[in-house]
Amino acid sequence: MTISDWLSNNWIEIFGAITGIIYVFLEIRQNIWLWPVGIVTSAVYIIVFFTSKFYADMSLQVYYLVISFVGWYWWVKGEGHRAQGTGHRAAEASRLPSMEGLGVGNEETKRQRDEETKRQRNKETERLSVARLKLKTGLILSCFFVLLYFLMWFILARFTDSPVPEWDSFITSLSIIATWMLARKIYEHWFLWIVVNSVSVVLFSARELYPTAILYMVYLVMSFVGLKEWKRSL
């Protein structure tokens, strides 16, 4: 088989690998365009994994499609960041007496002060901030992972012809947790991606999905980069 024949037979997978690399680069940069790129990548890999009999991974891509829209919304609206902004609002309140000193009873000064406070609050809530994983959230996600893993393993082993139901279930379940954490900008999600990507490189290489294996190798390297870059945002 010539190179041109191989490219023509695997162009969908190659295209998905390219968009996937763009996706993780945007993720590291915390660029909101990662979500539309992720939607395209997931749509492509639904086809790739279905033809390769990675049914759990195919289902994962459907989940990616849904969570990409949700994450896009969360990143735009900054949902959940309002609670974190309480400290900033307290700091603003502490500055109010000094501002009032400029003119007690001056209605114009008061109106300008209120408008400035409102602008500051809007600025704080317009983007979601990187946060650490709380213990309670971590325990809930761990329980959900175990439940999801065994459920997927049972379904794949009993009702499909998946060649590796245990590993397919593992990377899919862990990826679901990691993607949810990404949507909430939880820093520790990078550790999960390191595990997922390491296992995926071996798994997809064994199934001769070489463009996808290379993609996950790039994912693995960039996961360490993302871990370092996101730490600066804490």
Image (spheres, rainbow, N blue to C red):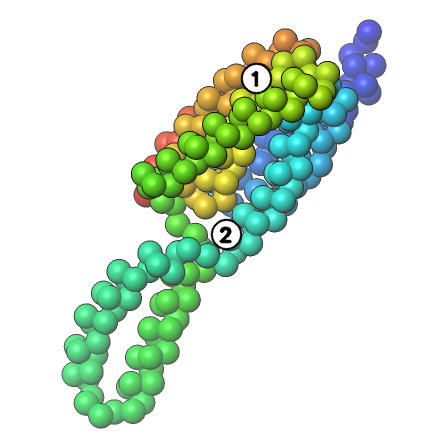
Give whichever of 143, 135 is nearer the camera. Answer: 143
Q: Position of residue 14 (x, y in %)?
A: 71, 24
- Where residue 107 appears, as percent x and y from the top left, is 29, 91
Whether residues under marks 2 and 1 lie with C-beta atoms below 8 angstroms apart, the answer is: no
Q: Earlier in the sequence, mark 2 or mark 1?
A: 2
Residue in the picture at 21% in, 76% down: 96
Quadrant of the image containing the N terminus:
top right
Q: Which residue is mark 2?
A: 75
Residue 188 location, x and y as percent?
39, 34
Disc 1: CA contacts within 10 A as few (<14), some (14-19) or many (>=20): some
Residue 68 sits above or below residue 41 on the image: below
Instruction: Give the numbered dot on residue 167.
Output: 1
Count of numbered labels shown in the rendering: 2
Q: Is residue 225 visible?
A: no
Q: Quadrant of the C terminus?
A: top left
Crowding at dot 2, Cα within 10 Å, few <14 / some 14-19 / many 20+, comes out as many
- Residue projecting furthest to the top: 1
Q: Is residue 94 visible?
A: yes
Identify which residue is drawn at 81% across, 9% down.
Answer: 2
Residue 169, located in which quarter of the rendered image? Answer: top right
